[in-house]
Amino acid sequence: MEKKELMYEGKAKKVFSTEDPSLYIQSFKDDATAFNAKKKGTIQNKGIVNNKISSILFQLVEKKGIPTHFVKQLNDRDMLVKKLEIIKVEVTIRNVVAGGMAKMLGLEEGIVLDSPVFEYHYKHDALDDPLINDYHAIAINLATKEELAYIEKTAFTINAMLKDFFAGLGIDLIDFKLEFGRYGDEILLGDEISPDTCRFWEKGTNRKLDKDRFRRDLGGIEETYQEMLAKVTSGAV
Ligand code: ADP
Ligand code: UDP
């Protein structure tokens, strides 16, 4: 499948149309941004790593019976996906306090939560993706109550599955963000699941294995992305 027209260029990916009106190609870039693009940089080969990790994880999710937009990995940077009408809520699940939750509630990073925390953020760059609840999402027509019920149930299933998978690799899944979209009558998991969109800490040491290395200038960024690719690849065989 060939790229036809650039439909959208985001912070981390380009999205192209194809000759099939129901399919898009996501092309993963090395561009890295943080703090809503106030910090910008490049992580060498990040696009390749995120495409490969996402491809593996989407296939794992599919195996659990959850439909995703993933069709196939086309090459190092490109993924063929079903064209979605993206629902403008970012769905976050947290198992351990970090990032935005630590800041918002004045908590230490690293506190293990007794039960996972589920959040919606309005996907709206100009507003810095504000935290909202289901009432906001329904009232401003981002999604229906039924859609949100499906999204919540599915996100928790994905959390349990990913937590298990990463535990087997000696990694704690701290938190992550998902996006869903409409495809005909179905809701599919979209976007990516990668070190850009998840927090991963090495078990025992709490060494950060994700985009926090870039956000916080921790060094060893490229190497850490490669390390995550090697681990995820080894876990998937
Ligand atoms: P951002 O828009 O936040 O800068 P990216 O650079 O990752 O993010 O751009 C990818 C864009 O494509 C995102 O806006 C995402 O919501 C959207 N997207 C992801 N999967 C699909 C899909 N299957 N169909 C249509 N759009 C998608
Ligand atoms: N996240 C993301 N995109 C965003 C915001 C957050 O992928 O626009 C991911 C982030 O990598 C982390 C989780 O969602 O795994 C929770 O992020 P948080 O709300 O703590 O935000 P941040 O620390 O980025 O401000």
Image (cartoon, helix red, strand yellow):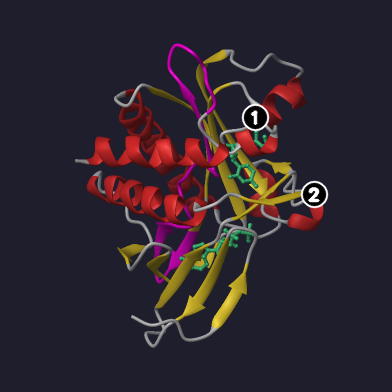
Q: Quadrant of ligand 1?
A: bottom right
Specify the amino acid type for callout 2: Lys
The residue at the point 38 percent across, 42 percent down is: 229
Under circle 1, the secondary element is loop
- Work out whether 18 lies above or below 121: below
Residue 211 belongs to the span the image colors magenta: no
The residue at the point 74 percent across, 56 percent down is: 125
Specify which label sits upstream in the sequence, 1 or 2: 2
Q: Residue furthest left?
A: 237
Specify the amino acid type for callout 1: Leu
Q: Which residue is mark 2?
A: 38
Q: Which mark is residue 218?
A: 1
Which quadrant of the view contains residue 83? Answer: bottom left
> Is the CB of mark 1 within 8 Å of ligand 2?
no
Quarter of the rendering occupied by the N terminus: bottom left
Circle 1 or circle 2, nearest the eye = 1
Query: Which residues are the magenta region?
Result: 181-208
Residue 169 percent across, percent down from the top left: 32, 26
Position of 177 with respect to 190 (left or right) is: right
Position of 38 with respect to 214 (left or right) is: right
The residue at the point 47 percent across, 45 percent down is: 194
Position of 105 with respect to 13 (left or right) is: right
